[in-house]
Amino acid sequence: MTGPAYPAARAIAATVHEHFARRIASARERGKEGLAAEPDAAAVEAIVDAAFWASLRREEGYRPKISLAFLSPGQAANALTFERPLPLEAVALSRLAPAVERPGIHLGVWRDPECLCVWGTTRDVPRLCFVLEVVEPGLLVIKYRRGRETGKYVNVAVLEGDRVKVVDERGTSLPDCPALITTLLGFGRADSGSDSVNVLLQLAASMRTHGRGGSLLVVPQGSDAWRESIVRPVTYAAEPPYPELAGLMARAAAERATTAWQEALIDAVEMIAGLTAVDGAALISDGFELLAFGAKIGRREGGAQVERVIVTEPVVGDSASVVNPVQLGGTRHMSAAQFVQDQRDSVALVASQDGRFTVFAWSPCEMMVHAHRVESLLL
């Protein structure tokens, strides 16, 4: 290894090992097959340490973006195997990064007789496989593959410098936890569950990726009540509502399994997510018709000014707090909280330019707007 040890690697290793051990044991009890090997604490520490120092290096002016998966060559289908495995070291990882920075490619890490090494690359990893992704310098995400689809992962922990956030599995114990949050935490049936929730996840991820900040309001289909909370006239209203995404979601299940449909869905999601970057908010129905974008939110006539919201983040050690919405961010957060207070059957997704992401939903238990901070789940 180059440089001193990364303290957070040792601090998180046992917790991550226990998480994967518990998950894999539970899956075996349920009769699941094709599961990944359990990463021991020493392997977790070594992989995190090497990835962290690699993330701080530059190769020809570029910062490395890599994904490491803990599995043997025999567990990966159609793997590219090196004749001579590489040492699990920062220098080797950063030099190899340009070849594997595209999404979906993992560097395979496994034990040789003496130490951990990088044996090759793979696009296929088994269920519950330990994966570590280098997002940017000093920012690492530990995750695992959720189900059959290779693109669906659940975050376990986020490490940013000396800050460590472990995702709290009990986050779904909130009695009014939205389905969107449940699925992000990994307990929703993303491989066989609600298609609508999965589309919202894709929209959230795309909003965060474009980096400009934005707001997306999801309102009940067939209702015009949302207009009471929008300043008129709406400069960019769609009449009739734009149906592309709704039409794709209405296709038969067999067609939704095709590559052409998946590509069309990605294009439609990215188009709508792009509209959220325009000053104001984009609005879609929960049937995915685009209603407007660039809309200005105003308080509903007769409605009270939102003064308090409850804030939680689904990470270990977090506790709920009640704050004034201005403490969450700028105008986007304040207006989104106001909209949800006035339109209680709606949900607001707000992305900040700095990468923070908040889902606003009405809490019938607390009788106030609940702001769910979920950026740790979207990385």
Image (cartoon, rainbow, N blue to C red):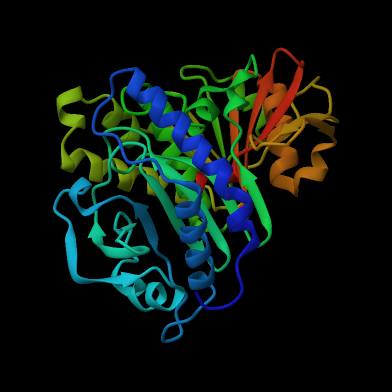
Residue shown at 35% from the left, 26% from the top? 195
The answer, for residue 165, to whether it is visible in the render is yes
Residue 184 higher or lower than 277, as above or below: above
Residue 360 higher or lower than 114, as above or below: above
Say which of 96 and 92 sits in front.
92
Q: Position of residue 181 (x, y in %)?
A: 55, 29
Q: Is residue 162 left or right of residue 120?
A: right
Q: Is residue 126 left or right of residue 355?
A: left
Say which of 266 and 2 sits in front.
2
Q: Is residue 51 left or right of residue 267?
A: right
The answer, for residue 235, to whether it is visible in the render is no
To which quarter of the image does residue 189 belong? top left
Residue lying furthest bottom = 60
Residue 270 higher or lower than 202, as above or below: below
Residue shown at 15% from the left, 36% from the top? 258
Residue shown at 31% from the left, 48% from the top? 267
The number of numbered discs placed on residues in the rendered structure image is 0
Q: Position of residue 114 (x, y in %)?
A: 35, 64
Say which of 62 and 69 sits in front.
69
Q: Position of residue 346 (x, y in %)?
A: 59, 23
Residue shown at 49% from the left, 53% from the top? 42
Say which of 258 and 103 sits in front.
103
Q: Position of residue 339 (x, y in %)?
A: 68, 30
To which quarter of the image does residue 334 belong? top right
Residue 125 higher or lower than 55, as above or below: above
